[in-house]
């Protein structure tokens, strides 16, 4: 919408200049039309000084009459020559007293005042008053005749006074009228450009109030500041939506976790409860059976403790404040200790563990040994769990481009191809072909991945062509910030 994004200040200033220019042009056009009308009807309209121009003609008659003009009987003849529709007159004697006239208003106080005001213009608001002397046959001063008139076009044309006043008023007010008119029109256009974004913002705010974030604000290329406001609102909506989605996802994960915990704990607790109940009912007279029951209770309790330990580990690594304690570790010594641990576990299941460490004897790496040990435990225990009796596990360690690489392979059933991307998902379990009969939490590889990520490393899984699982862990020898 709109042609270009412009700052509001610039648009307001531009609009003001447009209003001003259009108002001036319209006013000039109006005045031009009025002037043309006056020129066209010039022969029918008297000029503004029309009545002033009649005074010399009247004075010719006055000079002919001389003393006779002071007689009241001369009034009728004089008024035939005075245009009374637009002019008033007074005849005064030599002392300034009114003899007769069309107006009785006093403008002269005495003889001295009269002599001072002869042949000069007096002003009474919009009226002009002018007194001319009267002289006798001998040339003596005997009085004065005064005329009152206006120098306006309306007063000079009494029959067109209304029309002329309307034209004059329109000419006078036209600049203000046009300025107001164009201000309304251009202001309406500008406000319309601003109304749509505000309407969408209000509508968007109402949708957010009702927890509806599945909408998108329209881009308005009209006012720069409004576009920035709309963009900021849209960013806020996206952030809120992502936040809510994360919240909903966390809530779903929490529900899944509670269900998984309940499911995983139910089995060992049921076993413990059943065997404890058997011991209570049947006593402990049969030593062999008692020993078998106690061993089963111990194994089930151990599984429950392991599950709770893993849940506690998940809670720790998912906390925002979780961090690893990195320090230089001798890789060979660390791996030798772990290999000895896993050899004992493999012997219990008659699994052959072969290892290969192709790194310098004194090679060090920046690791959190406790957490990396946890990663290796989870991976190796998975391989031991899924390897068949008399199976094989191969563990190779090497260095490639300043990365410590540990690769663990087994000849178990491997991963389901369609689900291989999900093996690092929390509480993920495959079907019986991979899980076997021994229940587990589905947290091992998830914990391993999170710890490796904290080391700026990478953990991947794949199936071996000849069968079995292949897990690869890559960790930088030197962690960021320890260069």
Image (cartoon, helix red, strand yellow):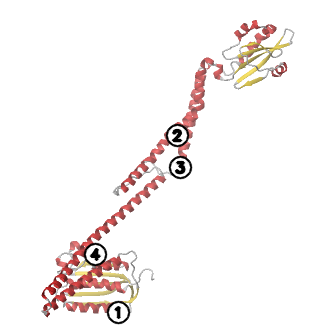
Q: In front: mark 4 or mark 3? A: 4
Q: Quadrant of the C terminus?
A: bottom left
Q: Which residue is mark 1?
A: 333
Sequence order check, earlier mark of 1 and 4: 1
Compute the Cα span from label 2 to label 3: 16 Å
- Image location of residue 14, percent across then percent down: 54, 46
Sequence order check, earlier mark of 4 and 3: 3
> What secondary structure is found at the residue carrying circle 3?
helix
Residue 428: quarter of image: bottom left
* Labelled pair 2, 3 in contact (Cβ < 8 Å): no
Sequence order check, earlier mark of 2 and 4: 2
Q: Which residue is mark 4?
A: 424
Sequence order check, earlier mark of 1 and 2: 2
> What secondary structure is found at the residue carrying circle 4?
loop
- Dot 4, how many residues are within 10 Å of its Cα: few (below 14), some (14-19), or many (20+)? many
Sequence order check, earlier mark of 2 and 3: 3
> What secondary structure is found at the residue carrying circle 2?
helix
Q: Which mark is residue 183?
A: 2
- Dot 2, how many residues are within 10 Å of its Cα: few (below 14), some (14-19), or many (20+)? some
Q: Nearer the viewer, residue 395 or 236?
A: 236
Q: Which mark is residue 284?
A: none
Compute the Cα span from label 2 to label 4: 66 Å
- Dot 3, how many residues are within 10 Å of its Cα: few (below 14), some (14-19), or many (20+)? few
- Dot 1, how many residues are within 10 Å of its Cα: few (below 14), some (14-19), or many (20+)? some
- Image location of residue 426, percent across then percent down: 28, 74
């Amino acid at each position: 919408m709109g042609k270009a994004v412009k700052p509001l200040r610039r648009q307001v200033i531009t609009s003001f200049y447009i209003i001003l220019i259009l108002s001036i042009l319209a006013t000039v056009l109006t005045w031009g039309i009025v002037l043309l009308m006056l020129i066209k009807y010039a022969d029918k309209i008297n000029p503004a000084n029309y009545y002033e121009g009649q005074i010399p003609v009247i004075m010719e008659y006055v000079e002919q009459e001389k003393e006779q003009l002071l007689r009241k009987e001369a009034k009728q003849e004089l008024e035939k020559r005075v245009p009374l529709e637009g002019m008033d007159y007074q005849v005064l004697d030599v002392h300034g007293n009114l003899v007769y006239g069309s107006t009785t208003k006093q403008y002269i106080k005495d003889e001295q005042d009269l002599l001072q005001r002869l042949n000069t213009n007096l002003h009474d608001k919009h009226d002009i008053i002018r007194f001319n002397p009267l002289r006798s046959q001998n040339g003596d001063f005997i009085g004065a005749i005064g005329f009152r008139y206006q120098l306006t076009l309306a007063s000079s044309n009494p029959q067109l006074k209304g029309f002329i006043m309307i034209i004059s008023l329109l000419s006078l007010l036209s600049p203000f009228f046009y300025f107001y008119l164009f201000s309304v029109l251009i202001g309406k256009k500008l406000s319309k450009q601003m109304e749509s974004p505000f309407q969408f913002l209000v509508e968007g705010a109402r949708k957010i109030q009702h927890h509806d974030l599945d909408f998108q604000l329209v881009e308005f290329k009209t006012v720069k500041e409004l576009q920035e406001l709309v963009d900021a609102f849209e960013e806020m909506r996206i952030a809120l939506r992502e936040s809510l989605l994360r919240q909903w996802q966390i809530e779903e994960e929490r529900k899944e976790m509670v269900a998984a915990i309940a499911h995983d704990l139910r089995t060992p607790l049921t076993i413990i409860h059943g065997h404890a109940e058997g011991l209570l009912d049947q006593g402990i007279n049969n030593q062999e059976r008692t020993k078998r029951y106690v061993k089963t209770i111990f194994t089930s309790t151990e599984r429950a403790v392991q599950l709770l330990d893993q849940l506690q580990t998940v809670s720790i690594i998912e906390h925002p404040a979780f961090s690893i304690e990195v320090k230089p570790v001798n890789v060979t010594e660390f791996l030798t200790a772990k290999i000895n641990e896993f050899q004992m576990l493999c012997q219990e299941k008659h699994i052959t563990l072969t290892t290969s460490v192709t790194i310098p004897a004194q090679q060090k790496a920046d690791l959190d040994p406790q957490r990396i040990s946890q990663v290796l435990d989870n991976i190796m225990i998975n391989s031991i769990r899924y390897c068949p009796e008399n199976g094989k596990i191969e563990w190779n360690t090497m260095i490639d481009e300043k990365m410590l690489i540990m690769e663990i392979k087994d000849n178990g059933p491997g991963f389901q191809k369609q689900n291989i991307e999900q093996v690092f998902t929390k509480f993920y379990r495959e079907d019986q072909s991979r899980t076997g009969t021994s229940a587990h939490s589905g947290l091992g590889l998830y914990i391993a991945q999170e710890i490796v990520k904290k080391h700026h490393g990478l953990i991947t899984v794949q199936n071996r062509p000849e069968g079995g699982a292949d897990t690869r862990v890559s960790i930088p020898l030197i962690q960021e910030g320890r260069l």
